[in-house]
Amino acid sequence: MHLSIVIPLLNEAESLPELSQWIADVMHRNGFLYEIIFIDDGSTDDSWQVIESLQKQNPCICGIKFQRNYGKSAALQVGFTHARGEVIITMDADLQDSPEEIPALRATLLNDKLDLVSGWKKIRYDNTLTKNIPSKFFNAVTRRVSGIALHDFNCGLKAYRRQVVKSIEVYGEMHRYIPVLAKWAGFTRIGEKVVEHRPRKHGYSKFGWDRFVNGFLDLLSITFVGRFSKRPMHFFGLLGSICFLGGLIMALYLVAGKLLDSEFALTNRPAFFFALTFLILGMQLFLAGYLAELIARNAPGRNHYLIETQIGL
């Protein structure tokens, strides 16, 4: 199968017939063997009934319905699990992503020997104040932190090699940072392609201001996990050592002052409480790193490594 097209959705009943027909036209025009996987993320409208109707008309359409709303990351993860194509395309169901971009995304991925191609909506039709400006800020921060030179991390239109989506886990709200997840998994050949962004025809955006706060926290989380999940003592141990050393220096200063001057007030000084705090904090951080190291060393998947190729075995 050439392509699996994974489409998470929430209350997009009006868009689905046009979107599925548009995708089918593009696939037939290019001679692709394909499947469309719709993941209904707990819709409260007629989205699932529409998917059932479309599946009867086109056997290349598959549908997965969640019992309730779990979020876009969960929908993508389930879609990735069921995808069978050589190349996996993700796109939104609101008709703002054009299916006409799919052949070019696939060609860029395969011809340039990339692991992932992310769309870049260079010209957007979203609200500038609530979406464009915050999006540019978080994209700049993500570029800085991750070292991945993409302009639009959150673009729903992306192309992946099959091995990439089978090797990563998308959870929480990490769908914004799939390129970062891919990089930490060893898939560093990441490219970008300018894609068309279309005005929304039906419904309304399902994301509010809270996505920016959650997105920033998820970025911190993914950065920490990516860098220190296999060696947590390097993080906690370093911080603990710095705190403990700072507290120890202050404690030695206080002890030396008391030895040189019997009237030196030891416990009435702010330095005494700072020293005590830093010593306790340093020991707690070091202990946290030790316990995290034990957990990491005994985790079931600690020796799971992604092998690109092998021979003679």
Image (cartoon, grey):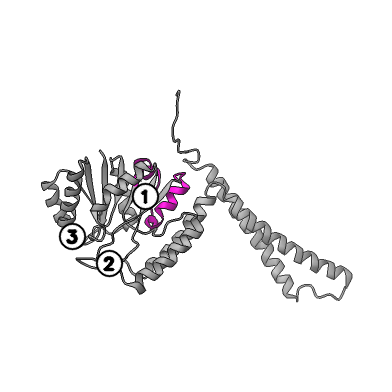
Residue 221 inside the magenta-drawn segment: no
Which label sits on residue 205? 2
Say which element carries label 2. loop
Q: Amino acid at mark 3?
A: Ser
Compare residues 9 and 254 and report the one nearer the observer. 9
Q: Amino acid at mark 1?
A: Val
Residue occupying the point 54% across, 51% down: 228
Q: Which residues are magenta?
A: 160-187
The residue that mark 3 highlights is: 15
Tell me whether the residue at label 3 lies in contact with that at label 1, contact meaning CB atoms closer than 8 angstroms: no
| Quadrant of the drawing holding the C terminus | top left
Tell me whether the residue at label 2 lies in contact with that at label 1, contact meaning CB atoms closer than 8 angstroms: no
Q: Position of residue 72 (x, y in %)?
A: 32, 57
Q: Image quadrant of residue 43?
A: bottom left
Q: Amino acid at mark 2?
A: Ser
Between the residue at mark 3 and the residue at mark 2, the CA separation in whole angstroms equals 13 Å
Say which element carries label 3. loop
Mark positioned earlier in the residue sequence (3 or 1): 3
Compare residues 153 and 260 and report the one nearer the observer. 153
The answer to whether residue 274 of the structure is visible from this angle is yes
Mark 2 or mark 1, whichever is nearer to me: 1
Mark positioned earlier in the residue sequence (2 or 1): 1
Q: Is residue 118 left or right of residue 19?
A: right
Q: Image quadrant of residue 85?
A: top left
Q: Image quadrant of residue 253?
A: bottom right
Residue occupying the point 65% across, 58% down: 240
Q: Position of residue 142 (x, y in %)?
A: 46, 60
Q: Is residue 9 left or right of residue 172?
A: left
The answer to whether residue 39 of the structure is visible from this angle is no
Q: Position of residue 308 (x, y in %)?
A: 44, 35
Q: Is residue 13 left or right of residue 278?
A: left
Which label sits on residue 117? 1
